[in-house]
Image (spheres, coloured by chain):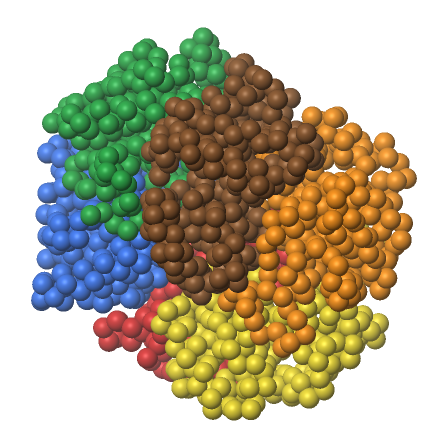
Chain colours: A red, B yellow, C orange, D blue, E green, F brown
Amino acid sequence: MTRIGIINPNSTSSMTTAIGAAALRAAHKTTEIIAMQNDRGPASIEGAVDGARAVPGLLDCIERAERGGAMDAYIIACFDDTGLDAARMLTRKPVIGIGEAAARIAAMISRRFTIITTLPVSIPVLEDNLVRYGLASVGTVRASGIPVLGLEADPSAALSTIGEGIRDALRVDRSGAIVLGCAGMADMAQQLSDLHSVPVVEGVSAAVRLAELLTSLELQPRATRTALPRHCSDDVGPR
Amino acid sequence: MTRIGIINPNSTSSMTTAIGAAALRAAHKTTEIIAMQNDRGPASIEGAVDGARAVPGLLDCIERAERGGAMDAYIIACFDDTGLDAARMLTRKPVIGIGEAAARIAAMISRRFTIITTLPVSIPVLEDNLVRYGLASVGTVRASGIPVLGLEADPSAALSTIGEGIRDALRVDRSGAIVLGCAGMADMAQQLSDLHSVPVVEGVSAAVRLAELLTSLELQPRATRTALPRHCSDDVGPR
Amino acid sequence: MTRIGIINPNSTSSMTTAIGAAALRAAHKTTEIIAMQNDRGPASIEGAVDGARAVPGLLDCIERAERGGAMDAYIIACFDDTGLDAARMLTRKPVIGIGEAAARIAAMISRRFTIITTLPVSIPVLEDNLVRYGLASVGTVRASGIPVLGLEADPSAALSTIGEGIRDALRVDRSGAIVLGCAGMADMAQQLSDLHSVPVVEGVSAAVRLAELLTSLELQPRATRTALPRHCSDDVGPR
Amino acid sequence: MTRIGIINPNSTSSMTTAIGAAALRAAHKTTEIIAMQNDRGPASIEGAVDGARAVPGLLDCIERAERGGAMDAYIIACFDDTGLDAARMLTRKPVIGIGEAAARIAAMISRRFTIITTLPVSIPVLEDNLVRYGLASVGTVRASGIPVLGLEADPSAALSTIGEGIRDALRVDRSGAIVLGCAGMADMAQQLSDLHSVPVVEGVSAAVRLAELLTSLELQPRATRTALPRHCSDDVGPR
Amino acid sequence: MTRIGIINPNSTSSMTTAIGAAALRAAHKTTEIIAMQNDRGPASIEGAVDGARAVPGLLDCIERAERGGAMDAYIIACFDDTGLDAARMLTRKPVIGIGEAAARIAAMISRRFTIITTLPVSIPVLEDNLVRYGLASVGTVRASGIPVLGLEADPSAALSTIGEGIRDALRVDRSGAIVLGCAGMADMAQQLSDLHSVPVVEGVSAAVRLAELLTSLELQPRATRTALPRHCSDDVGPR
Amino acid sequence: MTRIGIINPNSTSSMTTAIGAAALRAAHKTTEIIAMQNDRGPASIEGAVDGARAVPGLLDCIERAERGGAMDAYIIACFDDTGLDAARMLTRKPVIGIGEAAARIAAMISRRFTIITTLPVSIPVLEDNLVRYGLASVGTVRASGIPVLGLEADPSAALSTIGEGIRDALRVDRSGAIVLGCAGMADMAQQLSDLHSVPVVEGVSAAVRLAELLTSLELQPRATRTALPRHCSDDVGPR
């Protein structure tokens, strides 16, 4: 049994539930999904300030889980990949952000891809992440302009607006795959894919599958950073 | 049942067998591995000439399999990712090269990684591939100098020589993961990992798992290129 | 007398003839042009699959010529520079692709240039080549949308459509030179140059002249790859 | 009178005092330095985990100061530039990190420069920052291996060890300026400069002067992010 | 007292006067501005030829001033940063170009910025400079199309035309700061900033403040190149 | 008859003679070489200051020749490509720098190449030029440390010292071609090539041949910059 802890960095229970359910749908039957919520986190994460406020509680989640020792991998369920570098210092087990997962998968199925996110405030964060992943020259970021609540309030208008972004992505950016940059769009993935005849990658499912993959390969990722004075680093190899 | 066709681009049966066996070891029990051999290919692939001569037969393999319609994904089992772009034009199903798979996995578990290959003649090919994958700034390529046959002839000398390359990779390149750039090194993966306390990624297992992942996500990767006049391209979106 | 072998990687005689004639027109009178045809190749090359299928026969052409020992240089007359890396492994003599030749010449006469090719399916190949040549930041690729046969079928409509691409290149891409990305456009070079008052570079003539130049400099390009086990590589210098 | 708030993201009072004193020494006499301490922060910051835990309190500092409305600029006194992006979302006033300040100054006085930091664990963070500042091709990062306490414990050994790093920077990296990547090295700046005849840039003084500069130019940096739903972004211009 | 020599590389007295006045307005009261004029220079500098003709006299200015020994820093008051590299070889004191100053300041206050210059002939020079400063991915260059004289002839038309460029910069380039790429626009800075609610950076004031900053940090920038055979270089460190 | 004006940017007659002779040796018999000397230039060019002082006279040379109207192309015979951008503004005819010529030729015959220059002071200039040509990732620059006079004073010691640089280039930089970065090394080209079994590219011959090539292709390179107010630019296309 593979145990994957998927962490909602914000403190909204309904989102934690939805994330857990989405993860479960994507998981193999031999995978157990443990949804965790950062109770200290903000209600939602839109932009760098929210993201920063979410990280300490996120790190506590992982440290707590590590003391229990039961998890085989962790997923950070915020498309900004909030706190990813810090989280990777806490454990040797795989830690995956749903943004990174979706982007790397998209890069394997198309020469170019576009991330459609909600609001423009997220564009710089996602663009910086693409640079970090080496995907800045093959990925673009577009904002639908629809806040998370708008997705639920008027789904068909959302579908239409997101559809415009997709058409621009195909025509102007010449992308061959779309990445949904917000968990709230996940339910639209299949519909959008059918409507526009383009592969649509969603972050939670991509991350669950990648976590299963990395776990099954039985690699020891990074050197762990324990409470000891951290003077070892990834860059000189683990000891 | 997921059916993955793994193609040996060269015509050496013993290698096809070994590749198939390695793939089977890595596969989930719900995955069927079909090992295919390119009978028209050269005996082995070392460098751009061999690689080029291997591609037409490799493409025939895929076209034949596509006519059968049974495969869900394809893996090209040559670390140079020989013929990958052309192969992707033949089908909408995922096509993965073992070099690409290993490199992308390594990039998810360490900031920097080094590919240890056999002979220097392969270095330019692999470096070009790293550029294509956006990983040129995080991956380096080193040659052990041991030809494939040398790996089998004197495994402990090989272990030692490859070990020197790994130490250089850790110390000079500051890598935190090693990628084995030759199927012939696959059996040494675990030993090398334990000896040097560093994650070691091997291409066949990485590719099998990625193929399973992409298949399970039920994405439609590229627009298919059929026998019809190919005037559609990925760059303007699939039809 | 300088002897340049110019190889048509496809198997269409009329194209071989046309290529040879164009090469002859560009050559100095002390240069002998030997046009060679890849009889094993596809009828035409449009995209990565055709390109891949053309390479083995192309390599055979060069190997055969090398056994004869008469050639001083080789030109691969496909704008995709099909098989260029592999071909360079077969001889120490200069091997030039007409795409590379045209791009490098254009880069010497203008800060920015645009390649106008026929169909969109070629755009990714040419863009990848520009990256390889270090010209990705100064060259763009546009597709006229006209297949090769359309150039001959309705030349004035072709002139007009290509003209639109040139105007976009000048205005949007701010290019100062145009590269014709298809041999079939070669006859329009002068007309297009006059119509739009912009330098137009054509691949066959550029390649012939570059082959003459490299030959006359009497450089020994790459270390030759003979039938001996190829374990020397360019990267550690020739021996 | 210009009022600059300089924030120690960690909770160690002696460091806050030292930072404030260093800032005061660098400041013009018309500048008032207000040293602020993040009481919620970790005792020190070494690596991404500490950095992440420091940010929420750092942001609180700035929000509190903004409500008072007295500050003209803010400096984040951690060489990692911890929380810089998030902090810039909270105010239109200049926010400067001492790492960014030192790096940008060094880039104006030498073609190449090297940051000498304490421990290897900081190298990835600083390298990522150099990429963000566009300075990755002109700046390198070296670790002295001496933890902060070691600087105080045996200053002359520290001077010697750091000197080795400086010699490597000059000889191997061909740098013409040194940046001290740790506040604890600040007192050695003049000595190291004289010993090695090389300009040495220190972060607190660089940041104070840059803060004075940006303030005096009376620019309105970023659009402010207030408590209102943040749907404006820098990328579409301020409103 | 800090003494800054600001050099007008062209020979037009009215411009030297205006530059000196602008510098004085920006300077601290403890800074003395010495405006110098290159009497051997062209009447104005528009493009690479003018720029090249201006440099020898510019260098003479600096050499003469160095013999006097009174200056603490130099500013080259041409937005092209004409002769900057050569000037830096003549002295250890800071030498700053107003283009470099403005660009580096803009990069500290906004993720993206746009330089609005006068005529298109300057675009390549400024773009090359952005590459040199590591700012090519965050800065764009637009030409208003208004020559210098047009700015004075019809200021309100100029304001309007430049305003269009600013709107394009905000909307299309997604810039958050504007840099005025011509001294003749300096007087419009505040008006443009207010009109478009965007920070506007002007080169002379930015450079004066940066010169004051670098001087106050008491760094020894480059190794001086004296009349002795110059065989020391910045790249192996100063002696 | 093709007439190529090759300009010595410095004022040393013996060098002008040597350059003219080298050009003549490389030229086709239908090419007339006109050697021109910049009498206003410095005695030699070593570094950015000399280079800058040489440019105005160089531009005068070209303007004078253009008034005569006899030249078909120009070569700037300084390996720094001194004044190349400005010179290209003066004429529509090809203008080539010997550094650019040699680098672009080397890039066509080897994956990697190294420029061996005389003194370290030239390294930054040449590295900047490689960036401009898109060759920064394939070319390196090494300094032999031998000044021009040393080449003539003790040729065999020079041969030996340069040989060390070549060995480093092959072994460390993994280069497959050498470019001689100084006209004074030209006579050693063949000897060095034979000694080290590596292609050696020399700038004057490369430039002469490229000038012949560009002339024979009858392209109109850049829009001419005449004495008229220069408000057209390459970037919006020629008129």
Task: Please tell me which residue lies in front, D13 or E188.
Answer: E188
F110 lies above or below A66: above
Task: Please tell me which residue lies in front, F50 or B178.
Answer: F50
Indicate left or right for D117 with C40 as reference. left
Can see residue D9? Answer: no
The residue most toward the top is E153
Task: Please tell me which residue lies in front, A44 or F114.
Answer: F114
Name the residue rendered at 54%, 14% in the picture. F228
The spot of residue F234 in percent (x, y) is: 57, 28
Name which quarter of the figure residue D107 lies in: top left
For the C terminus of chain A, the image quarter is bottom left
Indicate left or right for B125 with C56 as reference. left
The spot of residue C64 in percent (x, y) is: 78, 66
Name the residue rendered at 69%, 43% in the picture. C209
Task: Please tell me which residue lies in front, B144 or B69.
Answer: B144
The spot of residue B207 in percent (x, y) is: 61, 75
The spot of residue E34 in percent (x, y) is: 21, 20
Can see residue B114? Answer: yes
Count of numbered badges drawn on the protein: 0
Name the residue rendered at 39%, 31% in the picture. F12
Name the residue rendered at 42%, 31% in the picture. F13
Name which quarter of the figure residue B120 lies in: bottom right
Indicate left or right for A196 with B156 as reference. right
